Amino acid sequence: MKNLNSVVVSGKEVLPIIEGGKGVAVSNGETSGAFAASGAVGTFSAVNADSYDENGDPIPVVYHGKTRKERHEELVEKGIAGGITQAKIAHEASNSNGRIHMNVLWEMGGAERILEAVLEGAKGLIHGVTCGAGMPYKLAELAQKHNIHYYPIVSSMRAFRALWKRAYGKRPELLGGVVYEDPWLAGGHNGLSNSEDSTVPEDPYPRVVALRKFMNEVGLQQVPVVMAGGVWHLKDWENWLDNPEIGPVVFQFGTRPILTQESPVPQAWKERLMGLKDGDISLNKFSPTGFYSSAVRNKFLLSLEGRHERQIPYLPKPDGVLTEALPIGPRQRPVYVEVQDKDRAEKWIGEGYTEGLKTPESTLVFELPDVALQIHEDQVNCMGCLSHCGFSNWKDYDDFTTGKKADPRSFCIQKTLQNVAHGTEDLEDQLMFSGHNAYKFGTDPFYANGNIPTVKELVERIMTGE
């Protein structure tokens, strides 16, 4: 394998390895500090980052506000405090080696406020900001204000071109790199566009070549592309090294760092990763963000698939082919459905799925009474963790509502990610984000006999090509 040359990232020469940021509370100060101490780039997540009590235990995230807006303000305050805490931990653990980056989802609730406050409160401790899950046009402006490098996450040349022409081209000096995140292989939220087929993965090479070509056209020849999503063994990417079509390149690892000694995730999660098989990760569109996302196909995801399948169109009055009366709700008021759909609905009701829940798209989904009650409670308890939430119809500005019905086909993402990160509930009943290569934990000899490496050992292993 070709030699892996060091690269300049956020103003310092480092190994060509970046830890992918994973929220909620998965990429933290300990993991990112360890990556930096190993001469690479560590990334802590500022998405609802943890704070700790006097014993060093994570402070439980509990909201006391009576309204969504009040709870949202609590969420922002907690997010700022947690982000500053993790930045300080990362800085101390780094021993002033490598670089420390902060990851922010642009579509998280209060993203700009949290980003600015953490950068101010941890001034000088953070060297770069990575940002995706949306189109972060203001990222360059914020980076310039705080004199920090910025790294937009995109899934196509077209997305970066839009960012460049609208905003980044006016402030190119601190653009530290462009993260190409493969939408078919990366874990978490994925940037598939409406013109792309979620079932037909595309080779990342020509997509990155197109990105590099545009970058070169606007004078960004020396700005590295960060390849993210699907990266496991660097030997598999040897043809990308010293390749003029790709240019300077760095590799981001999101999934492998979860299975390290420093990783804060529960032991049960680590053990679950080692038992995954090829195909156990599902690309789905159940997220309340409206984006596709990749997660372990466990009991939680199967329940969402079932809910989606138990779905039929309806109207409040008969029209066209929707002519069959179907009584629903405690008062058994009729809605009108197609003939064959009435038969399907009555079958589901007979199986116990007696609650017909209305969606924003004039469909009904049928659920068990206790599940329907939990959906309603989660919607009522919304704390505004997203800028726009399809599940609860929250919006984090103006009148604080999307103006649409809350969508029961989704779920409270804040609740389940807190549960899975802190091990408070059964993993099978929670959302477990994961990259599609996670099954390789079970086939890679590096993890044989349940071996869980330190971050330093992982970085050393990656640098061998393995």
Image (cartoon, rainbow, N blue to C red):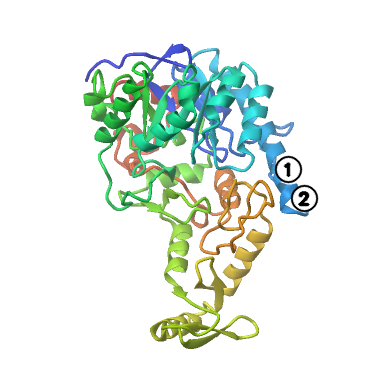
Give residue 26's position: percent from left, percent from top. 53, 37
Q: Is residue 134 left or right of residue 91?
A: left
Identify which amino acid the numbered label 1 is placed on. Answer: Glu
* Contact (Cβ within 8 Å) of mark 1 with mark 2: yes
Q: Which mark is residue 74?
A: 1
Marks 1 and 2, how far apart in space?
Answer: 8 Å
Give residue 103's position: percent from left, percent from top. 53, 31
Q: Is residue 277 above or below residue 314?
A: above
Element carrying mark 2: loop
Give residue 246's position: percent from left, percent from top. 27, 24
Give residue 140's position: percent from left, percent from top. 53, 25
Identify which amino acid the numbered label 2 is placed on. Answer: Gly
Q: Nearer the viewer, residue 47 or 403?
A: 403
User: Residue at label 2?
Assistant: 65
Question: Could you say which quadrant of the image residue 61 lies in?
Answer: top right
Q: Is residue 464 above or below residue 441?
A: above
Q: Is residue 73 left or right of residue 350?
A: right
Residue at 43% over, 62% down? 302
Q: Is residue 171 left or right of residue 196?
A: right
